[in-house]
Amino acid sequence: MNERDSEAVAALLRARGYRIVASEAECDILLLNTCAVRDAAEQKAIGKAGYALARKRRRPDFVVGILGCMAQNRGTALLEQLPDVDLIIGTQKFHQVPGYLDNLHAARAAGMPLGETIVDLAEEPGSQNEIRDHVLAQDEAPDAPPQVSAFVSIQQGCNMDCAFCIVPKTRGDERSRPMEDIVREVEQLAARGVREITLLGQIVTSYGRRDSAHTGGVSPFVQLLERVHAVDGIERIRFTSPHPRGFKQDLVEAFGRLPKLCEHVHLPLQSGSNRILRAMNRPYTRERYLEIVQALRAARPDMYFSTDIIVGFPGETEEDFAQTRELFEAANYDMAYIFKYSVRTGTPAAEMPGQVSDETKEQRNRILLDRLHENSLRRNQSLVGRVEEVLVEGPDKTGRRLTGRTRGNRVAVFAASGRPIGRLAPLRIDRATVSTLYGELVPAGVEAAEPKAGGQTSVFLSGSSR
Ligand code: 5AD
């Protein structure tokens, strides 16, 4: 989601005549879009901002801005550690960044002293509708490898009250974008060469529930999936993240009837213990969670699952953790993000008794990571000798081969043959590691892709991520 927000800011800046540069060393303005979900993310952003500010000492007109969740969470308190920062901009004000930069430049041109910080952390009704512009590689340079996969934000904010989570504070109340706007954005992306869309929201399963009706037992989110599915040129659809509470039969059935919907579901579990789920204020049980997994496997036997898990939530005993391990086995995840619980000031869990030691969190983290490693390797190896459809995304890190992903979201690397970027192509897999499949494109069905059509200040946007 932060990547998507950064990209929308970049697109607005470009439209104002700023140039987005690939390297931090070249920029005149550095904007850090920050995360606050764990302390480590905040520390990373503060470190990075401090480093950027050191550059200001050599070059006083250099501009440093802090955007997003940490800006929202810490506000002007950031000035104690980072007194020279120029902008502190919250999560409902991303679209105001170009205006604030213009103001800053105008003020400086008029001889105003350097050193005033612009702070805007207010709520803004309708701000969810402003995350809609994209910068695609094909727009920058028509002969660049085209970007064929894009995120589309469908909702901002969160109304759940998970006891561990800072997001309701940093992102505000849940607000959905109108379905028409989202569909128009997807159509425009398809026209620019995008083939795969990932719909983004904090709780996508709650999409539109205040604005649209269930019709014929179909939730607004599934209605949105149907509309996106009907867009010509879009060949794959993904979404993240659903909430187990909102994962109803209509969504399970959507996997059976919408062929563009890829067979990979990211379904955050957080804990496999009912006692801990209750303490976390997560309104489902381990039994209900497994029921959803089983229903999805019945709809699509080759379904892939990933999840988010927190180890060491306050009060988590060995018995609770054993329940998480057991569920981890039962769900047989192909991928998981495993987090050590991080105290977030202002959340209910921060005040709970029974805080777990770092050592225990580390041990539990290790156990699940080892298990995940085995699962991922086994699943990837089961694909050796088979042909999987990949969406060819572009050159790999070495630049000598191509990379793409399977429908199950596994990364594949293969030799470049012709220019199939942006195409779905059959890949015969001949080797697999935990994280990567290696193989060869099957010649039949692979056509060369047509190239996609597609006075300044330089900006570099950076983000801290999970
Ligand atoms: N500590 C550790 N992990 C957290 N997450 C959210 N809040 C915390 C926290 N305080 C994790 C959850 C969520 C993911 C995005 O981050 O697993 O799903």
Image (cartoon, helix red, strand yellow):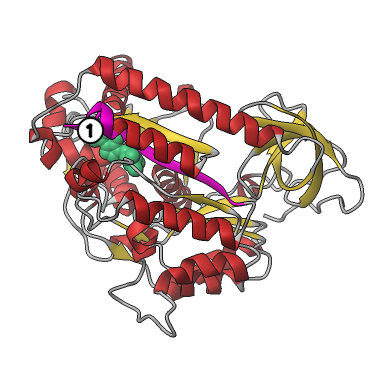
Give the left or right position of residue 151, taking residue 92 as reference. Answer: right
Q: Nearer the viewer, residue 319 or 271?
A: 319
Q: Is residue 359 visible?
A: yes
Q: Is residue 60 visible?
A: no
Looking at the image, residue 307 lies above or below residue 133 = above
Identify the residue shown where x is 44% and y is 58%: 292
- Callout 1 secondary element: loop
Residue 67 picture location, percent across and down: 29, 40
Identify the residue shown where x is 84% and y is 36%: 440
Looking at the image, residue 146 lies above or below residue 345 = below
Give the left or right position of residue 210, taking residue 451 as reference. Answer: left
Quadrant containing ligand 1 reads: top left
Q: Which residue is mark 1?
A: 313
Task: State the extent of the magenta-drawn residues as a range.
Answer: 303-320
Three-letter code for the amino acid on which mark 1 is drawn:
Phe
- Quadrant where the C terminus sits is top left
Residue 152 picture location, percent across and down: 48, 57
Q: Nearer the viewer, residue 424 or 399?
A: 424
Q: Nearer the viewer, residue 416 or 309?
A: 309
